[in-house]
Amino acid sequence: MNNNVFKNLSYGVYIVSCKNDNKYTGCTVNSIMQITSTPPTIALSVNHENYTNSCLEKNKKFAVSILSEESNPLSIGTFGFRSGRDFNKFEAIPYIIIDELPIIKDACAYLICEIIDKIETTTHSVFIAKVLNGDILNNKIPMTYSYYHNVIKGKSPKTAPTYIPE
Ligand SMILES: Cc1cc2nc3c(=O)[nH]c(=O)nc-3n(C[C@H](O)[C@H](O)[C@H](O)COP(=O)(O)O)c2cc1C
């Protein structure tokens, strides 16, 4: 099996955010895809070890900030390499509130979602969510996962579904 084959799949780069115990939290994800447009539905894969997994399970409602090529890469690192268990990520990153959820200020678009189903795999939960709301915030180009790796030279941790051991 050539594990490099997975590098040929395409994704975006997003920050998923939710509210837990009256605090905002969330993590960086690439694994979001649209499942259908009627009704608007997406899927999202979140590692069992991520604090965000238990917060989504508990609270059901979440936001997706769609990052652009011009979004500050600091958000990707802050939300992707630290845990909300011991750190308030939103203290470090500018955000706005839409529908009571935090959206990264320099994102190019956002979605507001509610979990309606879940599929379990060995390491990740695949959440199925209906999209309640969403809008475009500016005309910047959405960041792709390959832009993150090839232009920003970013890395992905072991908890990312696309992690490839070196
Ligand atoms: C570019 C990038 C993509 C990522 N994609 C995912 C993903 O799709 N699913 C996931 O569970 N974790 C993903 N991660 C890892 C989580 O963001 C990371 O484990 C985070 O620290 C979890 O934070 P939490 O414990 O506060 O939930 C990704 C990280 C990066 C940097």
Image (spheres, rainbow, N blue to C red):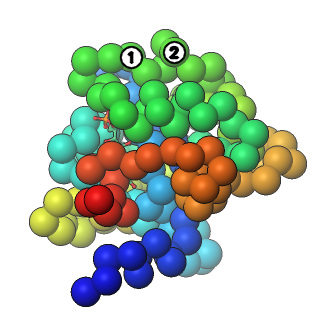
Residue 113 in percent (x, y) is at: 50, 51
Q: What is the distance, in whole Å, between disc 1 and disc 2 at their CAs?
A: 8 Å
Left or right side of 145 for 105: right
Q: Residue at x 60, y 34 (%)?
A: 73
Disc 2, SS: loop
Q: Residue at x 40, y 49 (%)?
A: 156
Dots 1, 2 in contact, CB < 8 A: yes
Q: Residue at x 56, y 46 (%)?
A: 153
Relative to the observer, which residue lies in front, 163 or 102? Answer: 163
Residue at the spot of label 1: 88
Taking the image in four quarters, ligand 1 sits in the one at top left
Residue at the spot of label 2: 92
Q: Which quadrant of the structure image shows residue 37? A: bottom right
- Mark 2 Cα-neighbour bin, 10 Å: few <14, some 14–19, many ≥20: few
Q: Is residue 98 above or below residue 157?
A: above
For label 2, being within 8 Å of ligand 1 is answered no
Q: Is residue 59 visible?
A: yes
Instruction: Name the quarter where the N terminus is drawn.
Output: bottom left
Q: Amino acid at mark 2?
A: Ala
Q: Is residue 65 above or below residue 33?
A: above
Outermost residue toward the bottom in this view: 1
Q: Amino acid at mark 1?
A: Asn
Left or right side of 124 for 11: right
Q: Residue at x 47, y 33 (%)?
A: 77
Left or right side of 70 for 4: left
Residue 43 in percent (x, y) is at: 43, 66
